[in-house]
């Protein structure tokens, strides 16, 4: 049924009717050579190091986000479109990223 299909797509961070090439969407906005070793280490840091709540962690897993670089390439709207991810989780992630002087895309 469509409900099952929607749930499967949601697990992969997709939606019914979505027509976006994920590879193109997540291209880095910076060249790796532009980054200092410290910045590169921060971008490659696991999202698990943020010590997020269970709900936010599950949403990151559902979206396939494992590194900070993958997270900061997402917009708040992309995160909010994930099942069980709400404003509280978004604010939690914004706070954790702010501690590292990072922001979500378009934030």
Image: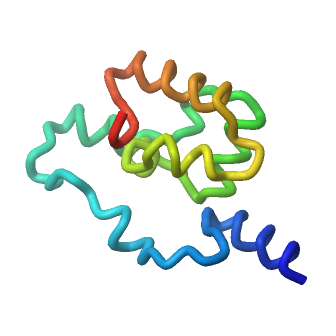
Q: Residue at position x 80%, y 68% from top?
A: 7
**Location of residue 13 with respect to 45 vertically, above or below:** below
Farthest-out residue, right: 1
31 to the left or right of 1: left
50 to the left or right of 34: right
Farthest-out residue, front: 17
Q: Residue at position x 60%, y 23% from top?
A: 92
Q: Residue at position x 61%, y 57% from top?
A: 63
Q: Nearer the viewer, residue 44 or 70?
A: 70
Task: Give x and y (percent) for residue 83.
Answer: 74, 51
Task: Give x and y (percent) for residue 90.
Answer: 58, 31
**Location of residue 95 with respect to 22 vertically, above or below:** above
Place residue 80 in its image quadrant. Answer: top right
Q: Nearer the viewer, residue 64 or 35?
A: 64
Place residue 12 in its image quadrant. Answer: bottom right
Farthest-out residue, left: 34
Task: Give x and y (percent) for residue 30.
Answer: 17, 51
**Location of residue 20 with respect to 40 vertically, above or below:** below
Place residue 64 in its image quadrant. Answer: bottom right
Q: Is the C terminus in the top left, top right, bottom left or bottom right quadrant?
A: top left
Task: Give x and y (percent) for residue 43.
Answer: 34, 42
Q: Nearer the viewer, residue 71 or 42?
A: 71
Q: Is the N terminus in the top left, top right, bottom left or bottom right quadrant?
A: bottom right
46 to the left or right of 101: right
């Amino acid at each position: 049924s469509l409900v099952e299909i929607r749930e499967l797509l949601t697990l992969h961070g997709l939606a019914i009717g979505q027509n976006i090439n994920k590879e193109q969407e997540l291209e880095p906005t910076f060249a790796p050579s532009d980054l200092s070793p410290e910045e590169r280490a921060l971008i490659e840091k696991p999202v698990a190091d943020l010590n997020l709540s269970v709900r936010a962690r599950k949403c990151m897993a559902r979206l396939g986000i494992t590194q900070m670089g993958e997270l900061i390439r997402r917009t708040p709207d992309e995160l909010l479109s994930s099942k069980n991810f709400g404003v509280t989780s978004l604010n939690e992630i914004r706070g954790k990223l702010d501690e590292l002087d990072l922001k979500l895309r378009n934030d």
